[in-house]
Image (tube, rainbow, N blue to C red):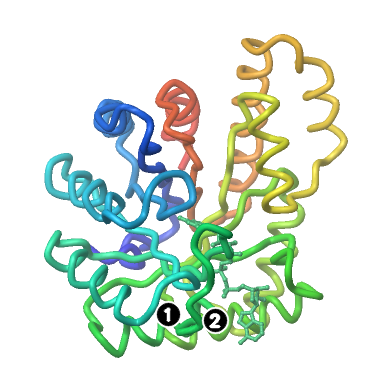
Amino acid sequence: MKLSEKFTGQKCILSFEVFPPKKSANADTIYTTLAGLKKLSPAFISVTYGAGGTSGDNITGKIASHIKHDLGIDSAAHLTCVSNTKEDIDIILGDLKANGIDNILALRGDTNPERPPKNDFHYASELIEYIKSKDDSFGISAGCYPECHPECDSIDADIDNLKRKVDAGAEHLMSQLFFDNEHFYGFLEKARAKGINVPIEAGIMPVVNKNQIERMVSMCGASLPSKFSRMMARYESDPDSLREAGIAYAIDQIIDLISSGVDGIHLYTMNNTYVAGKISDTVNGLL
Ligand code: FAD
């Protein structure tokens, strides 16, 4: 099923994101994690590409296939283009098709010293056009940035570029993480005013340890509201309390987003079934 078809009526959806195991890790842990996430009945689960795990062996496609065919949950495979040639993308698309994957989150990706840019694709919109030209049957999603993509000069220019992705064929958007809902509401208003009418899910990352937040914020540039910083300062040397406070913070964000009528919540689970479970148990009845 295409992800865009999940947004019917007024109900908000809750979806999850997982990442493949790192090469050094036990590959089976992801299957245990997914068995735990299945019990939480997410609307779909998306699987990252490259960022946290490997990319050359299409582990993303294999995991997305397991989610769809073995667990019976709709899935999406992330795919980045900046370090891939058109031939590389052709192989991956063929593999995703062979694995019965319906949905692709089409991304540019970040340049990685280990995988230099190949210059066939410069932006995600070019990947979306390319996928559409090769096989129009995939449902296509794209990323969006409530606080502006770090490389773009202004939120207005970034939303103009987002519109290019929608015009190229993205039918659904998932946002970068943020900790202040006002950024998301401001972004949403601007996006709708520019004629972006596809469903937009809010990306929420529960913060459960200090290292994680420092790494994520330096990578994606999300701003930290003072109430978030106070929470971090209060509990930074008490990991159990920080985890519980981070879960409570995410739940508070999500309830406010649902109350404001957002299309969906995309939870960055970080493969943590305990955290995803606590959040789902609280919000599932409120969607
Ligand atoms: P684009 O939409 O191409 O935008 C990149 C920059 O170029 C922006 O500043 C934009 O404003 C600008 N731009 C776009 N088009 C034009 C144009 N025509 N002219 C001038 N400027 C333009 N990364 C991974 O490696 N693996 C993952 O699995 C992954 N999953 C993600 C999931 C989500 C929900 C999100 C939001 C991000 C994810 N990322 C992932 C990170 C992503 O790859 C980076 O944020 C990357 O820097 C941008 O990707 P994009 O697809 O948004 O790029």
- Contact between marks 1 and 2 (CB within 8 A): the answer is no
Residue 114, image x and y in percent? 52, 57
Q: Classify 258 as above or below 233.
A: below
Secondary structure at badge 2 equals loop
Residue placed most toward the observer, 254 or 38: 38
Horizontal side, residue 84 vs residue 217: left or right: left
**Crowd tier of the residue under label 1, counting other residues whose Cα lies within 10 Å: few below 14, some 14–19, many 20 or above:** many
Residue 112, image x and y in percent? 56, 60
Residue located beneath label 2 in the image: 122
Residue located beneath label 1 in the image: 127
Compare marks 1 and 2 and give the one earlier in the sequence. 2
Quadrant location of residue 172?
bottom left
Residue 107, image x and y in percent? 48, 68
- Label count reads 2
Depth check, mark 1 against mark 2: the one in front is: 2
Please name the residue shown 34% across and 66% down the image.
104
Residue 267, image x and y in percent? 49, 42
Mark 1 close to ligand 1, CB under 8 Å: yes
**Crowd tier of the residue under label 2, counting other residues whose Cα lies within 10 Å: few below 14, some 14–19, many 20 or above:** some
Q: Classify 253 as above or below 57.
A: above
Quadrant location of residue 273?
top left
Horizontal side, residue 185 vs residue 13: left or right: right
Mark 2 close to ligand 1, CB under 8 Å: yes
Residue type marked 1: Leu
